[in-house]
Amino acid sequence: MSVVAQEAAEPSGHAAPHRILIIDDSQPTATALAAVLRRADYETAVAYRGNDGLHQARTGSFDAAVVDIHLPDLSGLVVSQKLREILGPETPIIVLSGDTSMTTLNSLPHVGATYFFSKPVNASHLLDRLKEWLAPQGER
């Protein structure tokens, strides 16, 4: 079963592409997400470990982040909290997981997550949400 349930891409129409940081230890998942986002005119950077993603966030410039909860070195919830500190209050942080327990879902607001998608991810829904969050203030 693919973790990206539906591959869809509509060009975003932005002159300068938004940059999305993907942090997921599953190479097939990260590759599929990056491909979907690139087809929708987003630039992507991928990290397979939480600490590597945090390093990229500190040294790069990102408009949004997509984070898996279960990473080999750090919890994705800890990564999300640190990303919120690095990226600021307005940057969307999207958490992905097959773990839909109430404990996980209830912790998301406390770590600064903007939204949660369960796996498999519906690509069209992800792209719609990103387009909404990354739209200029007057277009929201």
Image: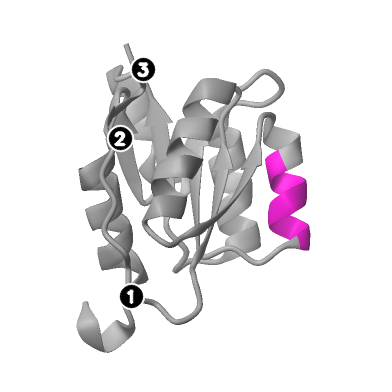
Answer left or right for 124 relative to 53. left
- Toward the top, the furthest residue is 1
Observer-nearest residue: 39 or 94?
39
> Element under label 2?
strand
Label 3 belongs to which residue?
A: 99
For the question of whether residue 68 can be seen, the reply is no
Label 1 belongs to which residue?
A: 13
Observer-nearest residue: 111 or 20?
20
Residue at x 36%, y 51% (from the top left corner):
114
Say above or below: 131 vs 51: below
- The answer to which of marks 1 and 3 sits earlier in the sequence is 1
How many residues crowd mark 3 within 10 Å: few (<14), some (14–19), many (20+)? some
Say above or below: 2 vs 6: above
How many residues crowd mark 2 within 10 Å: few (<14), some (14–19), many (20+)? some
| C-alpha span from label 1 to label 3 | 34 Å
For the question of whether residue 119 can be seen, the reply is yes
Queried whether the magenta region covers residue 128, the answer comes back as no
Pair 1/2: label in front: 1
Instruction: Tell me which amino acid carries mark 1.
Output: Gly
Q: Position of residue 16 (x, y in %)?
A: 50, 78
Quadrant, the C terminus: bottom left
Answer left or right for 139 relative to 36. left
Instruction: Tell me which amino acid carries mark 3.
Output: Asp
Answer left or right for 67 relative to 79. left
Please give the range of residues in magenta.
53-59
How many residues crowd mark 1 within 10 Å: few (<14), some (14–19), many (20+)? few
Label 2 belongs to which residue?
A: 117
- The answer to which of marks 1 and 2 sits earlier in the sequence is 1
Pair 3/2: label in front: 2
- Toward the bottom, the furthest residue is 138
Quadrant, the N terminus: top left
